Image: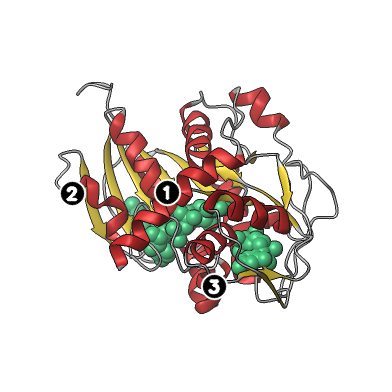
Amino acid sequence: MRNYNSRKRILVTGGAGFLGSHLIDRLLDRGDEVVCVDNLFTGAKRNIEHLHSHPRLEFMRHDVTFPLYIEVDQIYNLACPASPIHYRHDPVQTTKTSVHGAINMLGLAKRLRARIFQASTSEVYGDPAIHPQPESYWGNVNPIGPRSCYDEGKRCAETLFFDYYRQHNLDIRVARIFNTYGPRMHPNDGRVVSNFIVQALKGEPITIYGEGQQTRSFCYVDDLIDGIVRFVDAEPGFAGPINLGNPSEFTIRELAQQVLDIVGEKSKLVFCPLPADDPTQRKPDIALAREKLGWEPRVKLEEGLKKTVSYFEDLLLEGE
Ligand code: NAD
Ligand code: UDP
Ligand code: UDP
């Protein structure tokens, strides 16, 4: 537990979101002070409600596309809608959030000489032609499609981070996060794990896009937060980019079956059109994270899904 002398004042943008709220829990638990900045576009105060009146947490409703002048020691930049439904709702704002948001947070970090973490994404690899994806792969991204606001926005943010690193000698950390799931996912944001669990719990049909043969690798949120914090706490010298995700790969049909087994439902599967530019396979190569951080995920899909199902069960009961 950090004491008054060792504690840091840490800015988490997107802190009321799924990943941000878990990160804040972790930072507060170890004794740091946190400023949570969020415009509540996709996040919810409910995610940090349990911290209401916590003496070391401050919440600021603010949009990162506008400048921000505050004093902190470290920055975690997570602000950005992350699910296809949300980022396609206002694609221009999505690109602005990634690009202008990165510029403002990098400007802030530069003024303060603060270490800054960027939540990048496996989407920078697009529909990958190399499998699994190592950090050295440059990706296969459509620059003008419906996913481009997110993919290219995040790619441009990476460019900005590495230019501030080279040009201004900033202490940056860039992680490419692969599909992550767990409690506090938004129940209606259309991501596959939350969709399948909510559908199964309601006894509704499970919506498989395409044939369901596309693959993803799912990381439980606690593992991911461990990786992020280890990366940011490491001594300067390694800026990334680094893949953080779980290398166990499943087809979407396998995921549907696992969810149904856990929930104990026999919902039927319905097949819907595959969205444009939907990557056919995705699996992180995490050799670098193992080597540099001594990190690898521990939570198996079944175990993580059980915890997530139990979260959604409670959430649906509350809503009744
Ligand atoms: P989320 O939607 O739950 O959280 C994003 C948060 O950012 C929300 O609270 C939202 O209100 C806030 N936000 C959006 N635009 C903002 C703006 N302009 N100003 C201030 N706040 C803003 O999503 P998440 O899953 O927690 O994702 C967090 C970050 O991690 C995102 O940057 C996302 O791209 C990245 N990421 C997530 C995953 C994943 O699987 N969850 C995978 C790869 C990358
Ligand atoms: N910025 C900010 N907070 C700060 C410092 C800068 O939001 O404490 C923003 C500001 O909008 C600026 C951007 O970050 O335009 C980039 O800052 P930088 O110093 O890199 O560039 P410049 O100020 O020359 O545009
Ligand atoms: N998917 C699906 N049914 C759903 C939601 C998603 O079959 O109800 C598929 C989607 O087409 C994609 C995969 O699941 O192939 C992961 O989708 P998600 O939106 O969670 O993440 P991303 O595509 O960004 O990896």
Q: Amino acid at mark 1?
A: Ser
Label of residue 128 in the image = none
Q: Is residue 312 above or below residue 210?
A: above
Q: Is there CB contact under 8 Å for labels 3 and 1?
A: no
- On the question of residue 152 being in view, the answer is no
Residue drawn where x is 23% and y is 47% of the image: 50
Packing grade of label 3 (10 A; few <14, some 14-19, many >=20) is few
Residue drawn where x is 73% and y is 75% of the image: 276
Q: Which residue is mark 1?
A: 310
Q: Which residue is mark 3?
A: 85
**Residue 48 position in % (x across, y down):** 28, 51
Label of residue 52 in the image = 2
Which numbered disc, 3 or 2, marks the residue that appears first in the sequence?
A: 2
**Residue 304 position in % (x across, y down):** 53, 41
Q: Amino acid at mark 3?
A: Ile
SS state under label 3: helix
Left or right of residue 151: residue 318: left
- On the question of residue 278 being in view, the answer is yes
Name the quarter where the C terminus is drawn.
bottom left
Q: Is there CB contact under 8 Å for labels 3 and 2?
A: no
Q: CA distance from mark 2 to mark 1?
A: 23 Å
